[in-house]
Image (cartoon, helix red, strand yellow):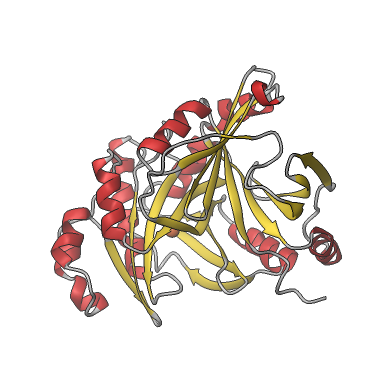
């Protein structure tokens, strides 16, 4: 069986949160997403409230609970607000599942057939790190942007230029990165294309290791981090302590104009990590000539890095919820197809400063 068309792309990402309405409001007013669907008691779903939101091709679902018996309530009490499902769109669920079963590394859940106004669609679930899952969705006979149980909602277009999900990063425990890389490579047919070891990504105090897998020519990119020993606590360990299990650290949102997107996000009140001014003094020596005005990048704290194909611009938000766990990245690629080492260090020094403020370094 051909293994290059088993998965298409990240279909949507579902969060379990304390208040779906507040998360939806925040993503609408500050992050530029449009609410396109709602699901709850009014649509026949008794135990939860969900908002489906979209910007460009990025779809996010925020799901809250209506009673403390709910599985969502338990999840939120343990982990705080966080990602539950990184859903992946597949062309033919039967083919994908037989490939996964033949490999024998990952055990898929049973196939569920869902019916709604849009027709029928089938899904199955894979458990990945922590309590995170990948639901595999085959939209074969489904003819709607909405999922079963959702009804359409009219809301204003507030697009800030976000086009796609570039990558989704998971944090796992010490010595667990390699087994999870095997899960994706040996279990699901992904390709491992990049490794950063603790020599690449260490600051004075803490370090981490990271490996990156991709599928379908970078249509899906999943980096996995684990803590590494340093003088002080690794920021990946701080994440694990607060989330109480492995989970999604950040989602990178891709834009074609990072300066404009970040300006709008900032004017909407989104807080980003600071970058030391010295970073920009050495920038041109490190990455060479770039199209953007370095003073504008300095003003906005946007980072630049290079790989052998080109360069990329990126910036990281402060944590989105109460616990210092999940955050967003905004990224623009100008030729670069992978990641550079330089920004890792700048990012981790910035996160460390925040970690120190929390008394956890
Ligand atoms: Fe990232």
Q: Which residue is at a point 23% across and 80% down the rendered structure image?
A: 288
**Residue 8 horizontal side relative to residue 276, left or right:** right
Residue 306 higher or lower than 106, as above or below = below
For residue 40, which quarter of the picture? top right
Q: Looking at the image, which is closer to me, 115 or 214?
A: 115
- Residue 267, image x, y percentages: 24, 42
Ligand 1: give its quadrant: bottom left
Q: Which residue is at a point 41% across and 39% down the rendered structure image?
A: 156
Residue 5 higher or lower than 349, as above or below = below
**Residue 281 horizontal side relative to residue 345, left or right:** left
Q: Which residue is at a point 69% across and 23% down the rendered structure image?
A: 47
Residue 39 higher or lower than 147, as above or below = above
Residue 273, visible in the rendered structure: no
Residue 127 higher or lower than 44, as above or below = below
- Residue 269, image x, y percentages: 27, 38
Residue 331, visible in the rendered structure: yes
**Residue 224 horizontal side relative to residue 123, left or right:** left
Q: Looking at the image, which is closer to me, 87 or 260?
A: 260
For residue 15, which quarter of the picture? top right
């Amino acid at each position: 069986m051909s293994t290059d068309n088993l998965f298409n792309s990240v279909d949507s990402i579902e969060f379990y949160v304390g208040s779906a309405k507040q998360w939806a409001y925040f993503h609408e007013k500050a992050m530029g997403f449009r609410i396109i669907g709602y699901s709850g008691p009014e649509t026949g779903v008794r135990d939860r409230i969900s908002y489906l939101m979209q910007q460009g091709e990025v779809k996010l679902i925020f799901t809250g609970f209506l009673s403390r018996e709910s599985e969502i309530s338990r999840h939120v009490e343990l982990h705080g607000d966080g990602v539950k499902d990184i859903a992946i769109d597949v062309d033919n669920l039967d083919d994908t599942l037989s490939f996964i079963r033949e490999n024998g590394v990952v055990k898929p859940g049973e196939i569920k057939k869902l019916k709604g106004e849009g027709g029928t669609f089938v899904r199955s679930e894979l458990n990945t790190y922590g309590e995170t899952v990948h639901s595999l969705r085959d939209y074969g006979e489904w003819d709607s942007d909405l999922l079963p149980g959702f009804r359409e909602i009219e809301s204003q277009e507030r697009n800030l230029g976000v086009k796609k999900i570039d990558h989704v990063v998971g944090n796992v425990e010490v010595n667990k990165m390699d087994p999870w890389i095997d899960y994706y490579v040996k279990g699901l047919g992904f390709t491992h294309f990049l490794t950063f070891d603790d020599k690449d990504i260490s600051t004075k105090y803490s370090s981490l290791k990271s490996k990156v897998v991709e599928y379908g020519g970078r249509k899906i990119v999943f980096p996995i981090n684990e803590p590494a020993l340093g003088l002080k606590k690794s920021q990946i360990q701080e994440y694990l302590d607060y989330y109480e299990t492995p989970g999604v650290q950040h989602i990178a949102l891709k834009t074609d104009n990072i300066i404009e997107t970040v300006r709008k996000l900032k004017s909407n009140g989104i807080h980003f990590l600071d970058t030391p001014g010295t970073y920009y003094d050495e920038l041109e020596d490190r990455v060479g000539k770039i199209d953007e005005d370095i003073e504008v990048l300095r003003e906005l704290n946007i980072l630049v890095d290079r790989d052998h194909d080109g360069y990329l611009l990126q910036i990281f938000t402060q944590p989105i919820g109460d616990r210092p766990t999940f955050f967003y990245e905004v990224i623009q690629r100008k030729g670069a197809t992978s990641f550079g080492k330089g920004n890792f260090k700048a990012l981790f020094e910035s996160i460390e400063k925040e970690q120190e403020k929390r008394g956890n370094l």
